[in-house]
Amino acid sequence: MSLVIDNFLCKACSNKNCSEHVAEKIATEKKLTLILNKEVAFFYAPSLDVTSEVITQMDQNFEETQSKNEAPKEEAKPKEATK
């Protein structure tokens, strides 16, 4: 149940850079059915570790967000005084 709630909150906040959203995207691309933190796995094959891919995607999303936020804004032109 908490996974459903976590996914709902992630989508509700529309933060495409949250780790859950990025991990879900990578899982879909790689046709994985489960991604766990290594802290909860008793054993895992290093070939299944997608940590670097998640981080790379999060960095890319962050850079895209930053560039959109830093896009030059049109400066307001001063209004001419009317008499």
Image (cartoon, grey):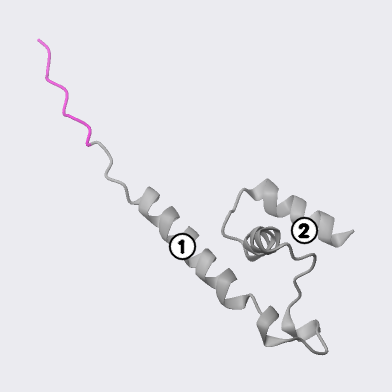
Residue depicted at 56% across the width and 77% down the height: 52
Residue depicted at 66% across the width and 82% down the height: 47
Q: In the displayed structure, would residue 22 be above or below residue 36? A: above
- Which amino acid type is marked by label 1? Gln
Q: Residue furthest bottom?
A: 43
Q: Residue furthest top?
A: 83
Question: How far across and down, in percent of the image, does residue 42 sit?
Answer: 83, 89
Quadrant including the C terminus: top left
Which of these two is toward me, 30 or 80?
Answer: 30
How would you rate the neighbour count of disc 1 (Cα within 10 Å): few for under 14, some for 14-19, many for 20 or more? Answer: few
Label 1 to label 2: alpha-carbon separation: 23 Å
Left or right side of 3 for 14 = left
Q: Which of the 4 image quarters holds residue 37?
A: bottom right
Left or right side of 36 for 80 = left
Q: Main secondary structure of the magenta part?
A: loop
Question: How far across and down, in percent of the image, does residue 36 sit?
Answer: 76, 75
Q: Residue furthest right?
A: 1
How would you rate the neighbour count of disc 2 (Cα within 10 Å): few for under 14, some for 14-19, many for 20 or more? Answer: few
* Residue designated by label 1: 60
Question: How far across and down, in percent of the image, does residue 57 sit?
Answer: 53, 65
Question: How far across and down, in percent of the image, does residue 50 sit?
Answer: 64, 75
Q: Residue furthest left?
A: 83
Highlighted magenta segment, given as a residue range: 75-83
* Residue designated by label 2: 6
- Which amino acid type is marked by label 2? Asp
Quadrant including the N terminus: bottom right
* Nearer-N-terminus badge (1/2): 2
Q: Does the segment drawn in magenta span residue 36? A: no
